[in-house]
Amino acid sequence: MKPIGKVLCATGLLVGFLAYYWQDPFDPESLVGARVLLTGASAGIGEQMAYHYARFGAELVLTARREAVLQKVMEKCLTLGAKKVFLIPADMSSPSEPERVVEFAVQKLGGLDYLVLNHIGANRFQMWAGDVEFTRWLMQVNFFSYVALATAALPTLEKSNGSLVVVSSLAGKIATPFTTSYSATKFALDGFFSSLRHELMMQKKNVSVTLCILGLIDTESAMESTRGKVHIPASPASEAALAIISGGATRVQQVFYPWKLKQVYYLWVLAPSNEVLQSYYNYSSP
Ligand SMILES: NC(=O)c1ccc[n+]([C@@H]2O[C@H](COP(=O)([O-])OP(=O)(O)OC[C@H]3O[C@@H](n4cnc5c(N)ncnc54)[C@H](OP(=O)(O)O)[C@@H]3O)[C@@H](O)[C@H]2O)c1
Ligand SMILES: *[C@@H]1O[C@H](CO)[C@@H](O)[C@H](O)[C@H]1NC(C)=O
Ligand SMILES: *[C@@H]1O[C@H](CO)[C@@H](O)[C@H](O)[C@H]1NC(C)=O
Ligand SMILES: *[C@@H]1O[C@H](CO)[C@@H](O)[C@H](O)[C@H]1NC(C)=O
């Protein structure tokens, strides 16, 4: 190769490297007064997101099933600096709830800038045992309710050039053991919302769609359901929450957290190995 070729090649690699690692800088100021509807806000990553948004001065509507727990999260948000916080208890396994929740939020906040879809139905981390009804129920909670919430919120998000933020998992990009139904719901989210993103762009509608791909996070529910079953270190929920918020605010298409998950994913795409993947899971036959 001629010297000029080497230089061009090196420059190309450098540019590629920078493009790969460059993230839009996140400015917390952009969230002052932002109107946010957050689901799954009573526990885990959702609860941590509520606290970050509160510190950044956002206006919040929090939803989940347990009213008493939401009340406590709301009180803490107010002490952290949130100007307005409202809560609405709702069970997302009921098909009529998404619309009611969005109507409530739009009415209380006078519109929406962020719809953050984060709730999930209680997960079973176990071998497929044939419970088709459970899969149907989980699809309703983890997928159909997301579609209905987003659909109800789109008109108001279009008015504000707002953002849809969808919380998913590595199990929604790579199928992993013990997650049959959960994985299915998360793959479905990728299909639906990545297609919707194309359509919004083609129609020049300025609503961003951010899909968040998380690894194992140290929430109570995840730690309990995976105990003794995976050999993967868990990352902190508060950091995961911040990564989601920052990705939504900078309008990126995909967020990977922890950051090395991006390499894990692309390594899998380039050189998948079932043996290596399965070695992270503990299966002791009965
Ligand atoms: N933790 C992880 O390792 C991990 C890894 C990858 C991706 N993620 C994703 O991160 C997100 C949050 O996970 P997490 O670990 O923080 O979950 P979590 O701690 O179990 O919290 C789930 C939230 O959803 C609410 N919820 C449960 N069932 C509901 C229902 N039927 N209707 C409405 N709300 C309901 C819960 O509140 P109520 O009980 O009060 O309803 C709670 O606020 C999920 O999308 C999950 O897939 C998590
Ligand atoms: C939304 O973005 C459009 C351009 O895409 C701009 O013309 C309009 O003023 C923006 N509206 C708001 C409320 O920011
Ligand atoms: C879309 O809206 C965002 C947020 O208001 C704004 O920063 C951006 O410039 C808009 N993009 C276009 C193409 O108008
Ligand atoms: C693997 O699972 C078995 C049975 O559930 C359990 O006894 C064992 O402690 C687990 N091994 C590890 C390394 O977690």
Image (cartoon, rainbow, N blue to C red):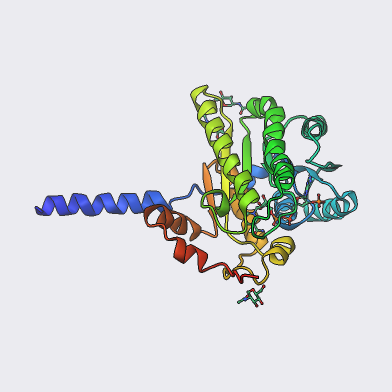
Residue 189 sits in quarter? top right
- Relative to 264, is 133 on the left or the right? right
Residue displayed at 61% across by 65% down:
235
Residue 276 percent coordinates (x, y): 45, 66
The percent coordinates of residue 10 (x first, y second) are: 23, 54
| Residue 192: quarter of image | top right
Query: Can residue 58 be seen at all in this image of the molecule?
Result: no
When the figure is inspected, residue 49 is found, relative to residue 144, above or below; the finding is below
Q: Residue furthest top?
A: 203
Q: Position of residue 267 (x, y in %)?
A: 40, 57
Report how many numbered discs are placed on residues in the image: 0
Q: Residue furthest left?
A: 2
**Residue sitting nearer the eye, 239 or 169:** 169
Q: Quadrant of the N terminus?
A: bottom left
**Residue 259 placement (x, y as % from top left):** 51, 59
Image quarter hosting the C terminus: bottom right
Task: Tell me: residue 192, above or below residue 168.
Answer: above
Q: Residue furthest right?
A: 68
**Horizontal side, residue 11 vs residue 274: left or right:** left
- Confirm whether residue 70 shows in the render: yes
In this view, the residue in front, 70 or 109, is 70
* Residue shown at 69% from the left, 61% from the top: 222
Q: Nearer the viewer, residue 36 or 261?
A: 261
Vertical relation: 4 (above or below) 280: above
- Position of 230 with respect to 104 (left or right) is left
Name the foreground residue: 263 vs 129: 129
